[in-house]
Image (spheres, rainbow, N blue to C red):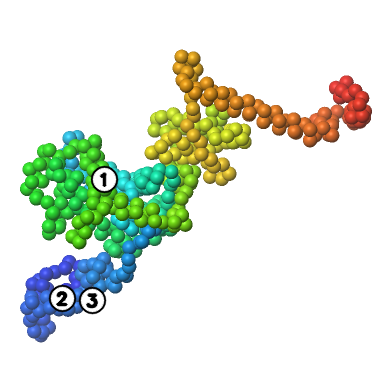
């Protein structure tokens, strides 16, 4: 009876448990107990009580044996991603209530080898969206490309993430790398959860709010808020406004995470997370990296443009989608594609960070990258240095198309010159005797005589 009272999900305190137990004990001829005795039993049998009393997560956290391991040694060998509610208050003048307590949520991509933030996306809301996840990864890809020389895209070898909207996210992560789903309720699936609460992350968060004084501390239930709540309250009327001001502060926060020296008690001269990551990256061999092409990048991270679920057609103008109320025009990379796929239904896959090129595909046999059309000046007054050369290239392309079509036609005619095409065309449409005369005339013609099938009609 005592253990049953102690394991109740309502988590009754020791005094309440003793009171309830003693009522039962009196009716059943058992001795009374004190609240201290109830506490002794609660602590002694906590391994049996905790699942029912506090839940599976609390039991796992305290009693399930933790698998020990060490951090990844190579950059991009393990990348984790998760949402994070930014601990800043902002003013929203258009809000109906609580105008000065609005917050942003972010989605963050972190390399676990050095806790380097690779990419992020954020919005003023309570929860992220799937598009935010894709944008955070695109941001990460651009960041990796920029700090490694700006010439190549690189993918990680492994991705870890939670099960949030896994029907959408896990197939996406699976295109990037081998995905390792986290066990339900596991707070130690990797390093990203600990990173958000690390001294380095907290220092960066506080530094970005040094002047604004809108950092709201760890959370409202923490024993130590990590901020002077009175000062936070006094500065509430001067908080940054949702929009440009808020975004500038958030960008500063992520800049600090990447570039602020990651000093510790034992190493006050430590370099930044980015510098540590780059040093290790430069020591990798080519076999320890996963480079991909621009076409592969668009295929994995691009957004498919399907207005109303429809495709668009390839024309002699190339492909011209309208995305976000803006009309774009893209030329096909070569004339063979234009001749082969003119009129084909395709989907345009675009990179919202760079609209200068798109992936054109029907997800079957068509797949190529098209680039923004080079517009030519119509008036001589608009001509610039090199514009004539560009126009000449366009005219040469047009001439090449005509030459290719003409050449194909001549080749086809050469292949069928031994066949009486006229007789084939008239097959079944003329009397047998007339058909025989046509064939006879053709034989004479093939030996150098005159041949005109229409004379027989």
Within the image, what quadrant is residue 80 found in? bottom left
Q: Do the residues labelled 1 and 2 touch (CB within 8 Å)?
A: no
Q: Which of marks 1 and 2 is nearer the N terminus?
A: 2
Question: Where 413 sits versus 366, above or below?
Answer: above
Q: In this view, does 195 lie to the left or right of 453?
A: left
Q: Which of 312 and 68 is in front in this view?
A: 68
Within the image, what quadrant is residue 94 found in? top left
Residue at 28 percent across and 53 percent down: it is 273
In front of the other: label 3 or label 1?
A: 1
**In x, y percent, where is residue 160?**
36, 58
Residue 14 appears in the picture as rendered: yes
Mark 3 to mark 1 CA distance (whole Å): 47 Å
Q: Is mark 3 on a helix, strand or loop?
A: helix
Point out the image quarter for the C terminus: top right
Which residue does the numbered mark 3 point to in the structure image? 48
Mark 2 to mark 3 CA distance (whole Å): 9 Å
Q: Can you tell which mark lies on residue 42? A: 2
């Amino acid at each position: 009876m005592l253990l049953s009272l102690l394991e109740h999900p309502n988590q009754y305190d020791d005094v309440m448990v003793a009171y309830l137990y003693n009522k039962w004990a009196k009716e059943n001829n058992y001795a009374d107990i004190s609240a201290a005795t109830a506490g002794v039993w609660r602590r002694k049998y906590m391994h049996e009580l905790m699942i029912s009393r506090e839940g599976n997560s609390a039991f796992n956290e305290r009693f399930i044996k933790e698998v020990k391991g060490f951090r990844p040694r190579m950059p991009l060998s393990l990348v984790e991603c998760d949402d994070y509610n930014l601990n800043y208050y902002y003013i929203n003048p258009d809000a109906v209530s609580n105008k000065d307590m609005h917050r942003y949520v972010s989605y963050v991509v972190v390399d676990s080898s050095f806790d380097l933030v690779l990419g992020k996306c954020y919005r003023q809301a309570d929860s992220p969206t799937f598009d935010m996840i894709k944008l955070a990864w695109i941001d990460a890809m651009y960041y990796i490309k920029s700090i490694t020389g700006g010439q190549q895209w690189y993918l990680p070898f492994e991705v870890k993430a939670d099960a949030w909207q896994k029907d959408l996210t896990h197939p996406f992560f699976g295109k990037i790398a081998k995905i390792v789903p986290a066990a339900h309720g596991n707070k130690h699936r990797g390093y990203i959860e600990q990173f958000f609460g690390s001294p380095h992350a907290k220092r960066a968060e506080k530094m970005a709010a040094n002047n604004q004084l809108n950092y709201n501390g760890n959370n409202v239930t923490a024993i130590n808020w990590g901020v002077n709540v009175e000062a936070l309250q006094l500065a509430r009327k001067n908080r940054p406004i949702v929009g440009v001001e808020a975004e500038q502060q958030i960008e500063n926060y992520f800049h600090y995470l990447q570039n602020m020296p990651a000093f510790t008690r034992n190493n006050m001269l430590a370099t930044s997370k980015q510098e540590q990551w780059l040093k290790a990256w430069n020591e990798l061999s080519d076999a320890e990296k996963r480079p991909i092409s621009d076409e592969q990048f668009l295929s994995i991270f691009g957004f498919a443009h399907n207005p109303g679920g429809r495709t668009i057609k390839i024309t002699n103008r190339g492909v011209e989608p309208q995305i976000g109320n803006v009309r774009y025009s893209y030329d096909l990379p070569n004339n063979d594609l234009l001749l082969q796929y003119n009129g084909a239904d395709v989907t345009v896959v675009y990179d919202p960070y760079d609209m200068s090129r798109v992936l054109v595909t029907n997800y079957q046999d068509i797949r190529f990258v098209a680039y923004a059309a080079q517009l030519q000046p119509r008036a001589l007054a608009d001509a610039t240095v090199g514009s004539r050369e560009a126009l000449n290239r366009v005219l040469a392309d047009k001439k090449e198309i005509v030459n290719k079509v003409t050449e194909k036609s001549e080749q086809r005619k050469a292949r069928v010159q031994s066949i009486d095409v006229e007789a084939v065309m008239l097959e079944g449409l003329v009397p047998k005797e007339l058909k025989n005369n046509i064939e006879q005339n053709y034989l004479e013609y093939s030996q150098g005589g005159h041949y005109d099938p229409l004379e027989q009609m």
